[in-house]
Image: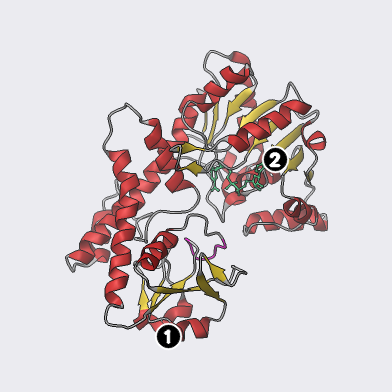
């Protein structure tokens, strides 16, 4: 089967490589450098499994049928499915996702191919697919949310928690296309996953085919739940800090309840990454005229946490003239090169607004400065110059300056 993919970012590239094990996949991007890198077998993003697959293709040990291209005709003409995995950034002016890249990709697909099933994999507002199908008079558009974690993008596609595909409930043809698409994804997964036993006693990868609007809601509610959980343990930590209590002991005791569980509970400077901040804001926008307290509080909690963290840092340099605050990594997680919407950036903004000098240590950033703050790759110089070292996540290379480090990474894990 010929499958086209629009966008070769985290989502588009991992789904392309997954499907290229059993299908002919053409992935299109509008950035020539990405296409060139991919066709040379190099990954534009840091991801162990993506690199393993691309290396395997280059050396011939993995027979992947994958090509990257800039040419819409090569990608889209004759494709059975065309997957859209382009960005949907949150537009603070409109208080809504900017879906223009999804619409541009769909237009480019339809210019070449009037019959392909278009599967939107980008995260979109609740109700978007139904509105777009009506606006374009195009019944061959469906939606399948993506649940991968950055840094584990292809791994999470090979070992999916679940596969969800949305089609209008009253449209039999679209429902069959959604079911076939879910099967394609399952076929690409690690074969061991087909034998696994789930918590509810079922076997294999759970597949859910539901309405497009329900599928969109599943994505936004899932990410907002994750944001809620991070915000909850962060707020617990804020309380413990303010009252001089051990957050570590409180969290341990709370999480010994198996209904709560000892995972995803390590305090941080705020929830971040590309998806959680924008998806929770979009869900809040979707609540317009629907009563709620919690969703708004989840969004607001992230700013409150960063205010608290910035204040904590400021008290640590209050007695210094012209203090230098060192930012150890811009990334959210250790082992990542990705700092899109990382929470440390919100903390930096608050510090800079108070006139504090910020020095950034970020070995993956090849630029002399980051929004006006000096960037260094020289760890020793960084350690010497910083009066306080702010680290969202601990790293053993900070052991010799632990007295300078400010972190809330209590459990030293992501
Ligand atoms: N990153 C994640 O962890 C994740 C997880 C689940 C869902 N999502 C959602 O998936 C979507 C994509 O996210 P991502 O992280 O892969 O983004 P990304 O920024 O890593 O990649 C998007 C790619 O699309 C390309 N692009 C832009 N316009 C295009 C067009 N018209 N045609 C073809 N390519 C185009 C860009 O050049 C870029 O390479 C977003 O809606 C996001 O919310 C992301």
For disc 1, does the CB lie below 8 Å from ligand 1?
no
Q: Residue furthest left?
A: 243
Which residue is labeled 1 in the image?
400
Residue 216 at what x, y percent from top left? 48, 31
Name the side, left or right, on which 277 lies relative to 335.
Answer: left
- From this view, report whether residue 332 is shown above or below residue 86: below
The residue shown at (80%, 48%) is 63
Residue 11 at what x, y percent from top left? 61, 45
Which residue is labeled 2 in the image?
19
Residue 279 at what x, y percent from top left? 45, 41
Residue 151 in magenta? no
For residue 186, what is the image quadrant?
top right
Q: How many marks?
A: 2
Please report the bounds of the magenta region as a residue range: 332-337
Mark 1: give few (<14), some (14-19) or many (20+) Cα within 10 Å.
few
The residue shown at (42%, 85%) is 400
Name the side, left or right, on which 200 lies relative to 371.
Answer: left
**Residue 207 in sight in this render:** yes
The local secondary structure at tag 2 comes to helix
Q: Which mark is residue 138?
A: none
Structural distance between the alpha carbons of marks 2 and 1: 46 Å
The local secondary structure at tag 1 comes to helix
The residue shown at (38%, 73%) is 356
Q: Nearer the viewer, residue 24 or 168?
A: 168
Image quadrant occupied by the C terminus: bottom left
Ligand 1: give its quadrant: top right
Q: Nearer the viewer, residue 199 or 287?
A: 287
Q: Nearer the viewer, residue 6 or 255?
A: 6
Mark 2: give few (<14), some (14-19) or many (20+) Cα within 10 Å.
many
For residue 405, what is the image quadrant?
bottom left
Residue 241 at what x, y percent from top left? 23, 66
């Amino acid at each position: 089967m010929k499958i086209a993919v629009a966008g070769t970012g985290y989502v588009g590239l991992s789904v392309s490589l997954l499907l290229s094990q059993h299908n002919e996949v053409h992935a299109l991007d509008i950035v020539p450098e990405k296409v060139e890198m991919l066709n040379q077998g190099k990954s534009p993003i840091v991801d162990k499994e993506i690199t393993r697959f691309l290396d395997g293709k280059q050396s011939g040990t993995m027979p992947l049928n994958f090509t990257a291209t800039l040419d819409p005709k090569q990608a889209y003409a004759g494709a059975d499915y065309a997957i859209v995995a382009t960005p949907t950034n949150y537009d603070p002016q409109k208080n809504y996702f900017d879906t223009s890249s999804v619409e541009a990709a769909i237009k480019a697909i339809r210019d070449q191919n009037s019959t392909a099933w278009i599967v939107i994999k980008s995260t979109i507002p609740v109700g978007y697919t139904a509105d777009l199908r009506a606006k374009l008079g195009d019944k061959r558009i469906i939606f399948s949310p993506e649940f991968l974690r950055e840094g584990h993008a292809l791994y999470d596609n090979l070992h999916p928690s679940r596969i969800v595909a949305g089609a209008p409930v009253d449209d039999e043809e679209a429902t069959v296309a959604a079911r076939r698409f879910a099967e394609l994804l399952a076929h690409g997964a690690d074969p061991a996953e087909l034998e696994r036993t789930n918590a509810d006693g079922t076997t294999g990868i759970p597949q859910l085919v539901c309405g497009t609007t329900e599928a969109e809601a599943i994505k936004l509610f899932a990410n907002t739940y994750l944001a809620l959980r991070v915000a909850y343990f962060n707020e617990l930590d804020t309380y413990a800090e303010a009252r001089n209590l051990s957050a570590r002991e409180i969290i341990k005791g709370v999480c010994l309840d198996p209904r709560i569980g000892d995972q995803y509970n390590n305090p941080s400077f705020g929830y971040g990454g590309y998806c959680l901040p924008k998806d929770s804001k979009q869900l809040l926008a979707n609540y317009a005229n629907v009563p709620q307290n919690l969703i708004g509080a989840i969004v607001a909690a992230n700013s409150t946490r960063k205010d608290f963290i910035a204040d904590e840092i400021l008290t640590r340099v209050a007695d210094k003239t012209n203090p230098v605050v060192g930012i150890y990594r811009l990334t959210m997680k250790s082992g990542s090169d990705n700092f899109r919407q990382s929470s440390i950036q919100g903390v930096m903004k608050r510090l800079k607004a108070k006139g504090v000098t910020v020095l950034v240590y970020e070995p993956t950033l090849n630029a002399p400065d980051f929004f006006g703050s000096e960037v260094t790759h020289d760890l020793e110089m960084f350690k010497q110059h910083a009066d306080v070292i702010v680290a969202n996540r601990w790293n053993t290379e900070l052991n010799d300056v632990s007295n300078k480090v400010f972190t809330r990474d209590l459990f030293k894990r992501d």
